[in-house]
Image (cartoon, rainbow, N blue to C red):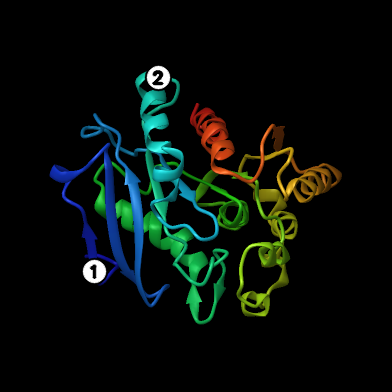
Amino acid sequence: MSKFRTVEISNPAFEQQHLRFLTVKTASLKGRGDICIFVPPGITDLSDLPVCILLHGVYGSAWSWAFCAGIHLRAKEMMERKEIKPMLIAMPSDGLWGDGSAYLPHHQLDFEKWIATDVPEVLIESFPQVSEKSPFFIAGLSMGGFGALRIGAKYNERFKAMAGHSSITMLEQMKLFVEEDLQGYTQNDPTSENVLDTMLKYKDRLPPFRFDCGNTDLLIADNRLLHQQLQENNIPHLYEEFEGGHEWPYWEKHVIRTLQFFDAQMV
């Protein structure tokens, strides 16, 4: 029996480029949430299929990673060349609150639970190749990087590894992007407003993680500071910098490193 009142999934007969769309009604959102899913060819007989959850940034939605970065095309090429193992790539919306939900609970809606619990559960229900034994990974860009690093750290029993690109590292940085009053995002537990504080809270249980940032990105100083603070607190991680700014060409290029990183965790 489904944990959700309704789940609508697109007909594979009409799919383009192996992208499937799923809409699920969830109590976390008090409404419906969308997920765009890359379903690689040739997985029919597979079991315990790995799942990579990719979170978008402000202003975007479930379509962003596929139609701004072509992640499904790059992933398919990598799988065909056997550079990475087959994996489902699930790209959920953030809940579509304001300019961005920050993947936090607020305004009587739980955007964190939507990602950490509902998305994995509906994928397990909807795809026979995905199970509770499937390794789940989580990554994101900008606001999605904030969500991925924080949620991955907090729900470490669910996620095998995590990653962020050009990540917001503290909630206060959301004011660079959104028009909504940041007081509306305030958490009962201030730890949830800061990636470092969240990682310190779960320091002994953190999954492997990487993050990167462009050297002309408006968040570069914040990412460098997080890297320094993680080093000072002896938290193992991989941090890299590359040419580029807060832009899709950067994320399109470097998300490949995250897929490779996740694949390496399955050895």
The amino acid type found where label 1 is placed reads Thr
Residue 177 placement (x, y as % from top left):
63, 62
Judging by the rendered image, the residue that carries numbered circle 2 is 82
The N terminus lies in quadrant: bottom left
Q: In this view, does 148 lie above or below 253?
A: below
Residue 266 drawn above or below residue 82? below
Q: Residue at x 68, y 67 (%)?
A: 175
Residue type beneath disc 2: Lys
Q: Where is residue 240 in the image (x, y as percent from the top left)?
A: 71, 33
**Cβ atoms under marks 2 and 1 closer than 8 Å:** no
Pointer 1 residue = 6
**Residue drawn at (47%, 47%) of the image:** 54
Element type at mark 1: loop
What residue lies at 40% left-to-right and 43% top-to-bottom? 66
Where is residue 245? Give x, y as percent: 66, 41
Where 214 sits versus 91, above or below?
above
Asked if one can make out residue 187 in the rendered structure from this viewpoint, the answer is: no
Compare residues 59 and 148 and report the one nearer the observer.
Answer: 59
Rendering coords of residue 63 (x, y %): 38, 51
Q: 10 Å neighbourhood of mark 2: few (<14), some, or many (≥20)?
A: few
- Disc 2 from disc 1: Cα separation: 36 Å
